[in-house]
Image (tube, rainbow, N blue to C red):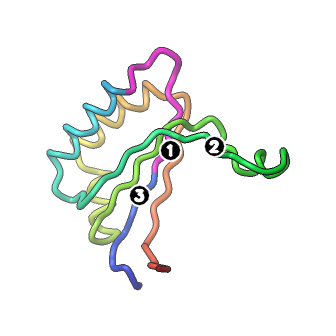
Amino acid sequence: MEGGCFKRLVLFKFKEGIEVEDMLNGLKKLLSEIDLVKSAEWGAAADIQQGSEAAKLRITAKGFTHALVMRFENQEDCLAFMSHPAHVESGAAFIEALDDFLGLNFPVLSLK
C-alpha cells in the first residue's frame, strides 16, 4: 500500500442548539490523550457548489455539517483507537449531540 497509513473519515450532523465549539474542545482533549492518532483535521462544510441544478444535487453534503479526518500508522492502530476506553466514553457523549454521522475507515493510496 503506497502512502503507508490508514485513515478514518467521520461526517457529523449536529442536533439543533448544540454548541459545536464545546464538542470540538472535547474532541481535542480526547485526541491529546491517545497517541495512536498521528494527525487529525477538522472542518465545517463549505458551500462551494456550482454548475447545473442536477450537478448541485449530486454534490450535496446530505445535511452533514462537519468532518473529521484522522491518520493512523495502520489499521490496527485505528481499531485500537476505536475500542480505547476514552474514545468509547467520549464517543457515547458525542453521539448524543448528533442527528446523524457517517464513518469510513480506509487504507491510503497516494495519487499525487
Give the number of the mark in front: 1 or 2.
Answer: 2
Relative placement, left or right, of 60 versus 34 is right
Which one is nearer the viewer's eye here, 95 or 12?
Answer: 12
Image: magenta residue range: 10-20
Residue 74's quadrant in the figure? Answer: bottom left
- Please determine whether, in this image, residue 88 is positioned above or below residue 109: above
The residue drawn where x is 33% and y is 79% is: 4
Magenta run includes residue 13: yes
Q: Secondary structure at mark 2?
A: loop
Q: Are marks 1 and 2 in contact (CB under 8 Å)?
A: yes
Q: Residues within 10 Å of mark 3 (few under 14, many from 20)?
A: some
Q: Are marks 3 and 1 in contact (CB under 8 Å)?
A: no
Q: Secondary structure at mark 3?
A: strand
Work out how far the residue at label 1 is from the one at label 2, CA to CA, in angstroms: 9 Å
Residue 57, given in percent of the width and then of the height, sits at 78, 45
Magenta run includes residue 2: no
Tell me which label, 1 or 2, sits earlier in the chain: 1
Which amino acid is tagged 2? Answer: Ala
Relative placement, left or right, of 74 versus 59 is left
Q: Residues within 10 Å of mark 1 (few under 14, many from 20)?
A: many
Mark 1 highlights which residue? 11
Relative placement, left or right, of 112 versus 6 is right
Which amino acid is tagged 1? Answer: Leu
Work out how far the residue at label 2 is from the one at label 3, CA to CA, in angstroms: 18 Å
Mark 2 highlights which residue? 61
Tell me which label, 2 or 3, sits earlier in the chain: 3
Mark 3 highlights which residue? 8
